[in-house]
Amino acid sequence: TMWRAKPWEVAQRLYEQTGVRVMAARDGMKFDLSQLA
């Protein structure tokens, strides 16, 4: 499952490999997309 893959670690690896900011989300998580720019 994705949870066993530790999504926060996957997000960090993707960022390190691509330079693109990646966020690992959880159920019920909320954030303002306008604040991400």
Image (cartoon, grey):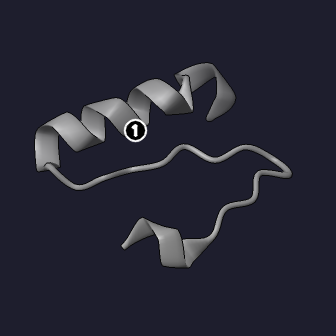
Q: Which residue is mark 1?
A: 11
Question: Could you say which is closer to the camera, residue 6 or residue 30?
Answer: 30
Which kind of residue does numbered mark 1 sit on? Ala
Image: 35 above or below 1: below
Query: Which residue is at a point 54% across and 43% down the rendered structure image?
Result: 24
Question: Could you say which is closer to the camera, residue 29 or residue 17?
Answer: 29
Query: Which residue is at a point 62% across and 35% down the rendered structure image?
Result: 2
Quarter containing the C terminus: bottom left
Q: Position of residue 36 (x, y in %)?
A: 44, 67
The answer to whether one can see residue 14 in this image is yes
Residue farthest to the right, as pictured: 28
The answer to whether one can see residue 1 in this image is no
Q: Quadrant of residue 1?
A: top right
Q: Position of residue 31 (x, y in %)?
A: 66, 62
Label tally: 1
Q: Does 23 sit left or right of 27 as displayed?
A: left
Q: Quadrant of residue 13?
A: top left
Q: Does 6 sit left or right of 3 as displayed?
A: left
Q: Does 30 sit left or right of 12 as displayed?
A: right
Image: 30 above or below 9: below
CA neighbours of label 1 inside 10 A, class few (<14), some (14 to 19), many (20+): some
Query: Which residue is at a point 64% across and 47% down the rendered structure image?
Result: 25
Q: Does 28 sit left or right of 26 as displayed?
A: right
Secondary structure under the numbered disc 1 in the rendered image? helix
